[in-house]
Amino acid sequence: MLLRRPMLHRFTSRRAVMRVALTSIAAASSITVASGGAAPASAATAVHIYVAGDSTASTYDSSKAPRAGWGQALPVFLTSGVETVNAAQSGASSKSFADTGRLDRILAVIKRGDLLLVSFGHNDEKSDDPSRYTDPSTTYKWYLSQYIDKSRAKGAVPVLVTPVERRHFNSAGVISPSHGAYPAAMRELAAAKGVPLLDLTASSTALWNRAGVEGTKKHFMILKAGQYPNYPNGSQDNTHFQALGAIEVARLVATAMRNQGVLPAADFRRLTDPVPTSAIVWPSAAPARGLPASR
């Protein structure tokens, strides 16, 4: 989708002129942040990227390794002046994330010049669960609009991210779309509201098709019995990622942000470099509350 470039130039120029001062937020809100670069950035100068999403973006602790989310891997591609706050929650939809107060906790700490990446769709599709289901043309757009309007009111920059595609190949060895009308609905809303859109549905579909039926097994949680201690019986999960998949999907997100001017090019690193799976950090335990950060 073509974005309105003058709008994005405003985002970039504002960021280039001013690195917004941010106060320490961990104690007040149980939110922790992770530096994207090798050297820690000052909380007074760092810009924060908040990730609101589902299990495909979540941060997983060491008991779940090698499972990882793209929000957990995103800091690999960011310099020390940008910090990631990964608030993505397994099982969340645009509706349940907002209704359970997680959006409000982000809004309580997000500051002018920060970014809010919003990526939902996997669980909005669950029509048998009224606590999560949204209709693509009505309630899905309505909930996404809350993220847009409320973050803009705080001076932050909302960015919509279409849901990452699953590993569903047809008989011809080509990825079959699995998200119905949700990606198109998000694209329409982004155009209507003048919001940057990262079309992760399209870019991940292209990535999976390039990797093929066998190659994608290294990206998803397709594990043999005994291959990893945390999964003694193996796994046949075509939705969630192991470390390589999380890294490559995060690369798609970061590259799209760079290409569209959502952040200055100087804020990114390693976009075309090989990245070892050891670059991902799995925390020893998931936080009991609050919004965990990826590293």
Image (cartoon, rainbow, N blue to C red):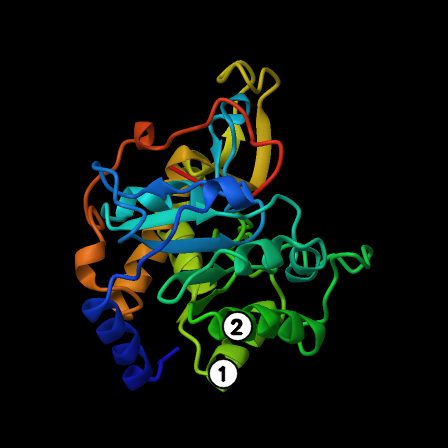
The residue that disc 2 covers is 148
Q: CA distance from mark 1 to mark 2?
A: 8 Å
Tell me the quarter of the picture where residue 240 sits.
top right
Indicate the amino acid at tag 1: Lys
Q: Position of residue 261 (x, y in %)?
A: 26, 70
Viewer-proximal residue, 225 or 282?
Answer: 282
- Quadrant of the frame with the N terminus: bottom left
Q: Is residue 230 above or below residue 74?
A: above
Q: Nearer the viewer, mark 1 or mark 2?
A: 2
Q: Position of residue 193 (x, y in %)?
A: 49, 83
Q: Confirm whether residue 255 shows in the render.
A: yes
Q: Residues within 10 Å of mark 1 (few under 14, many from 20)?
A: few
Mark drawn on residue 147 = none
The residue that disc 1 covers is 193
Q: Confirm whether residue 291 shows in the render.
A: no
**Residue visible at 26% across and 45% down?**
42
Indicate the amino acid at tag 2: Ile
Viewer-proximal residue, 114 or 64?
Answer: 114
**Residue visible at 54% across and 79% down?**
189
Tell me the quarter of the picture where residue 141 sits.
bottom right
Which SS class for mark 1?
Answer: helix
139 horizontally vs 162: left or right: right
**Residue visible at 60% across and 58% down?**
103
